[in-house]
Structures are given as structure tokens and as C-alpha cells.
């Protein structure tokens, strides 16, 4: 339904539909699908010239990364190894992996390749770290 609303020129309705889908996925115990739907709702909201509804505001806050998660996400998307990131940030690899799982869940991705695409990063390892 969301795609149909968007195609008809009704992105606010499409965003609302995706927000409802996000809520339904969350209730069904599917956090990744829920987050993916919430992120789609956010993208659709961008077409709405600043229009907001209570449901859309809640959706935006649910998918936000903390400052530390954003830092880790960008390092992981640049294809740094977990051990390298952990050493750089002076945390354990296990703590780093826990952060990555939280990041993946919030962004609705399952691996670093999807994370890089979500963040719009395409830096290959060879140029990121000589």
C-alpha cells in the first residue's frame, strides 16, 4: 500500500502506512523488518515538505543511532576489522560486536555490506587504510 500511495503522489500517506507496518513488525517480534519499515517511512517523510504527524515523529526517534553507534557504524562501513575498530576505540571486540548488533537492528541491516549501502559509503579497504 505504501508504494501505491507514493506512486499516486501521496508520500505522507505512504509514510504513515510504513509507520503502521513498522509497528506491526515490532509487535510480531521482527525488529529488523520493523526498523526497515521505519527507515522507509523516514525517507518518505522527506518528500513531505516538513509535514509531521505524531506517528512519524515517534518513528524517527526509534531509528536514531547514538553518537558512539554512529562512530562505530562508519568505521565498520569503511571495512575496518572488528579488532582494528576495538583497538582504535579502546573497547573489547565483544563490546564492539554488541554495538554492531544494536546498529544492525536499528538500521534494519544484517551485515557490513548492507550497513555501508545504508550509510552511502563505498570506500574499499585498500584506500581506507593504506
Image (spheres, helix red, strand yellow):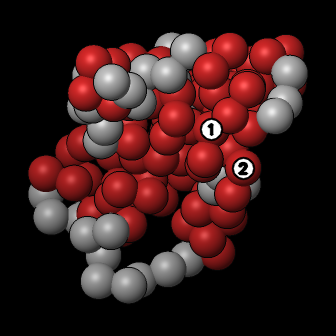
Query: Viewed as shown, does residue 46 lie left or right of 60?
Result: left
* Position above or below: 59 against 86: below
Residue at position x 39%, y 42% from top?
119
Image coordinates of residue 11 in percent, x first then y, are: 28, 63
* Secondary structure type for disc 2: helix
Is residue 129 in view? yes
Residues at discs 1 and 2 in contact (Cβ within 8 Å) = yes
Q: Nearer the viewer, residue 76 or 61?
A: 76
Query: Viewed as shown, does residue 75 lie left or right of 85?
Result: left
Residue farthest to the bottom, as pictured: 50
Question: Where is mark 2, residue-wise?
Answer: 68
Image coordinates of residue 59 in percent, x first then y, are: 62, 58
Image coordinates of residue 88 in percent, x first then y, are: 68, 34
Please tell me in which quadrant of the rendered image residue 106 appears. top right
Residue at position x 26%, y 69% from top?
47
Q: Nearer the viewer, residue 112 or 92?
A: 92
On residue 87, the disc is: none
* Position above or below: 38 against 102: below
Crowdedness of circle 2 by 10 Å Cα count: few (<14), some, many (20+)?
few
Question: Where is mark 1, residue-wise?
Answer: 72
Q: How far apart are labels 1 and 2 at the CA level?
A: 6 Å
* Secondary structure type for disc 1: helix
Query: Viewed as shown, does residue 13 lie left or right of 25?
Result: left
Please tell me in which quadrant of the rendered image residue 64 appears. bottom right
Is residue 55 in view? no
Residue at position x 44%, y 58% from top?
42
* Position above or below: 84 against 73: above
Image quadrant holding the C terminus, namely: top left
Amino acid at each position: 500500500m505504501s508504494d501505491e500511495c507514493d506512486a499516486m503522489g501521496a508520500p505522507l500517506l505512504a509514510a504513515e502506512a510504513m509507520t503502521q507496518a513498522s509497528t506491526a513488525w515490532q509487535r510480531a517480534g521482527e525488529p529488523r523488518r520493523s526498523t526497515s519499515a521505519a527507515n522507509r517511512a523516514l525517507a518518505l517523510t522527506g518528500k513531505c515538505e516538513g509535514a509531521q504527524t505524531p506517528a512519524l515523529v515517534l518513528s524517527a526517534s526509534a531509528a536514531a543511532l547514538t553518537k558512539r553507534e554512529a562512530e562505530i557504524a562508519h568505521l565498520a562501513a569503511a571495512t575496518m576489522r572488528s579488532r582494528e575498530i576495538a583497538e582504535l576505540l579502546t573497547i573489547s571486540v565483544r563490546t564492539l560486536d554488541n554495538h554492531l548488533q544494536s546498529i544492525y537492528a536499528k538500521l534494519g541491516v544484517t551485515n557490513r555490506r548492507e550497513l555501508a549501502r545504508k550509510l552511502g559509503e563505498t570506500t574499499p579497504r585498500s584506500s581506507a587504510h593504506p
